[in-house]
Image (cartoon, helix red, strand yellow):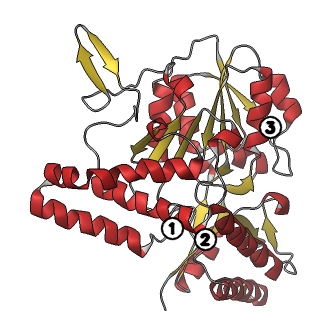
């Protein structure tokens, strides 16, 4: 029996065509060397921008290919001038790495409450946003809780109050499992990962930034790819401005192929499939009151977090691993604000994808029930 991957929020199984695309380029690189291989594959490499712009509804030039969401996020914020009198609004589901940046830079942060039902408290948002707010930064779906946050409603509300506020969306966990349309959502900046729900290779990510915001930033890393010297001045390119000369063409090709497949299949069909599996999983366990889920059934995605009374998360994880089931444990390091709010030390995370079968889910359910019954006997 092969391992069943229910840790798609960590890293999905790459599509076979993704690995094939990567290996194919590496063979070309072996034969021709890195530079000429890129020259031969230039048109195909550039398909990445076409494929991603189609998925998120933007222009090719507004995208930069990078190695991760965290790098993309940090490159943007470290390239943006934020004055001491300005503030940044974040939410109680903020990701741990993002929070480290804020603390390190000592920015004036305001934290907007998320209600028990997993939805943002608009009364608190209205109270905390003001004329000095520079950025509103939101995690679309958090790694530690699978609630889908209503980004479109939030950003439209923000723009109505203060049109100049920069709206940043962390789509690391949402891109590839639910529709992410930058025009509908009304975000100025969006970062995403390749290895999770897009089923691309590790070491891939991206940033989208619209033309309007590009004029307000000064990229912290410049080289011959994104800038040039004209006379005594440095001119920053208008396109793909966070990219630098060195990159992994094989990974970009693999990532492009993964996005191409999502576009071909249809993100809405993928979304329905994944949410149906989360609902099915919960329905199968609804009679076991030892299990507590932490998501709102009305805002479900593929990420499900839970605790089982009397059995700690490490014990559950270890038992499932012995049954060849991969999942993960999420802890305060992933989201300090969230764990302080719910007052638990860790959660078991089960994250479904389209390729997971109902037979796989039934096996998972059986294993969890068996574990509960064993604990009851002891």
- Tell me: 207 left or right of 330: left
Q: Looking at the image, is mark 2 or mark 3 earlier in the sequence?
A: 3
Residue 84 position by quadrant: top right
Helix, strand or loop for disc 3? loop
Q: Give the residue displayed 63% in from the left and 41% down from the top.
A: 182
Give how far across and how far down residue 235 sits, in percent. Answer: 32, 18
Which dot, 3 or 1, sits closer to the camera? 1
Label 3 – label 1 distance at C-alpha: 31 Å
Q: Are marks 2 and 1 in contact (CB under 8 Å)?
A: yes
Count residues near mark 1 (Cα–Cα under 10 Å), then give few for <14, some for 14-19, many for 20+: many
Residue where numbered disc 1 is placed = 12
Q: Nearer the viewer, residue 244 or 86?
A: 244
Give how far across and how far down residue 72 sits, in percent. Answer: 46, 39
Give how far across and how far down residue 185 sits, in percent. Answer: 70, 41
Residue where numbered disc 3 is placed = 113
Q: Up-down: is 30 above or below 341?
A: below
Q: Give the residue displayed 14% in from the left and 51% down from the top.
A: 36
Q: Looking at the image, is mark 3 or mark 1 earlier in the sequence?
A: 1
Q: Nearer the viewer, residue 264 or 251?
A: 264
Which image quarter holds the C terminus? bottom right
Q: Nearer the viewer, residue 290 or 73?
A: 73
Residue where numbered disc 2 is placed = 353
């Amino acid at each position: 029996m092969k391992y069943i991957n229910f840790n798609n929020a960590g890293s999905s199984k790459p599509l076979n065509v993704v690995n094939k695309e990567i290996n194919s380029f590496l063979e070309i690189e072996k034969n021709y060397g890195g530079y000429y291989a890129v020259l031969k594959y230039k048109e195909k490499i550039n398909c990445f921008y076409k494929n991603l712009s189609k998925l998120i509804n933007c222009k090719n030039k507004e995208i930069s290919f990078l190695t991760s969401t965290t790098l993309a996020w940090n490159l943007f914020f470290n390239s943006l001038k934020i004055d001491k009198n300005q503030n940044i609004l974040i939410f109680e589901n903020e990701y741990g790495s993002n929070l480290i940046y804020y603390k390190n830079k000592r920015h004036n942060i305001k934290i907007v409450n998320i209600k028990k039902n997993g939805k943002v408290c608009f009364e608190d948002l209205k109270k905390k946003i003001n004329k000095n707010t520079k950025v509103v930064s939101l995690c679309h779906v958090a790694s530690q809780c699978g609630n889908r946050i209503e980004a479109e409603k939030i950003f439209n509300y923000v723009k109505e109050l203060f049109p100049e506020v920069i709206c940043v969306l962390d789509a690391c966990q949402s891109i590839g499992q639910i529709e992410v349309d930058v025009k509908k959502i009304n975000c100025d900046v969006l970062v995403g990962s390749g290895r999770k729900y897009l089923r691309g290779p590790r070491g891939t990510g991206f940033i989208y930034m619209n033309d309007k915001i590009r004029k307000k930033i000064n990229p912290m890393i410049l080289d011959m790819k994104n800038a040039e010297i004209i006379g005594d001045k440095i001119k920053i390119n208008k396109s793909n401005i966070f990219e630098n000369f060195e990159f992994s063409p094989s990974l970009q090709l693999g990532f492009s192929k993964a996005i191409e497949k999502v576009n071909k299949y249809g993100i809405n069909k993928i979304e329905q499939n994944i949410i149906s599996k989360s609902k099915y999983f919960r329905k199968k366990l609804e009679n076991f009151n030892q299990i507590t889920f932490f998501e709102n059934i009305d805002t479900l995605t593929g990420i499900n977090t839970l605790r089982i009374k009397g059995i700690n998360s490490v014990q559950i994880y270890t038992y499932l691993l012995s049954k060849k089931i991969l999942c993960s444990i999420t802890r305060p390091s992933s989201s300090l604000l969230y764990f302080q709010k719910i007052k638990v030390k860790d959660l078991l995370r089960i994250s479904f994808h389209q390729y997971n079968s109902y037979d796989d889910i039934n096996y998972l359910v059986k294993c969890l029930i068996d574990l509960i019954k064993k604990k009851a006997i002891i």
